[in-house]
Amino acid sequence: LDLMVERRPDGAAALVLTSTPLRPGSPPGEALLIEKAARIEWAYYDAASRGWLSSWTGRAGLPALIRLRVASSGLGEWPDLVVRPRLEQGPLCSFDLVGGECRWAT
């Protein structure tokens, strides 16, 4: 899955989700999650430096937190969405909501 901020011809920002299928020959999927935003910003919290960074390219491991900030042209600032990334057992597991961990399907 890829989440990309795109600048539209009218100057507005959009957040687009693109999925690459695991099965060869299957078409990729695309969904428009946010459109007509004045601004969309990603930030990554580096626990070592205790600060927010605008990019995470080339760093070892995952950031401690990821923040999505959106300003809508008509509605003003949205509340920040902050998540803690977690990838411990690989992307091809089933997440167990009760146990709070990935389990491999058998």
Image: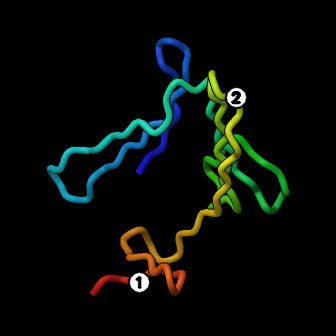
- The answer to whether residue 3 of the structure is visible from this angle is yes
- The answer to whether residue 60 of the structure is visible from this angle is no
Q: Quadrant of the C terminus?
A: bottom left
The answer to whether residue 76 is left or right of residue 4 is right
The residue closer to the viewer here, 80 or 74, is 74
Residue underneath mark 2: 76
User: Residue 103: which disc?
Assistant: 1
Q: Which residue is at 29% across, 44% downward?
A: 29
Few, some or many residues within 10 Å of mark 2 (<14, 14–19, 20+): few
Residue 74 image offset from top left, x and y in percent: 63, 22
Mark 1 secondary-structure assignment: strand
Mark 2 secondary-structure assignment: strand
Q: Which residue is at 26% across, 54% downward?
A: 21
For this orientation, the residue located farthest to the left is 25
User: Does residue 30 sit above or below 38 in this rendering?
Assistant: below
The residue closer to the viewer here, 53 or 74, is 74
For this orientation, the residue located farthest to the top is 10
- The quarter of the picture where residue 91 lies is bottom left
Residue 36 image offset from top left, x and y in percent: 52, 24
Query: Between disc 2 and disc 1, whose residue precedes?
Result: 2
The residue closer to the viewer here, 60 or 49, is 49
Q: Amino acid at mark 2?
A: Gly
The answer to whether residue 6 is left or right of residue 80 is left
Q: Amino acid at mark 1?
A: Arg
User: Does residue 28 sit above or below 73 in this rendering?
Assistant: below
Residue 78 image offset from top left, x and y in percent: 67, 38
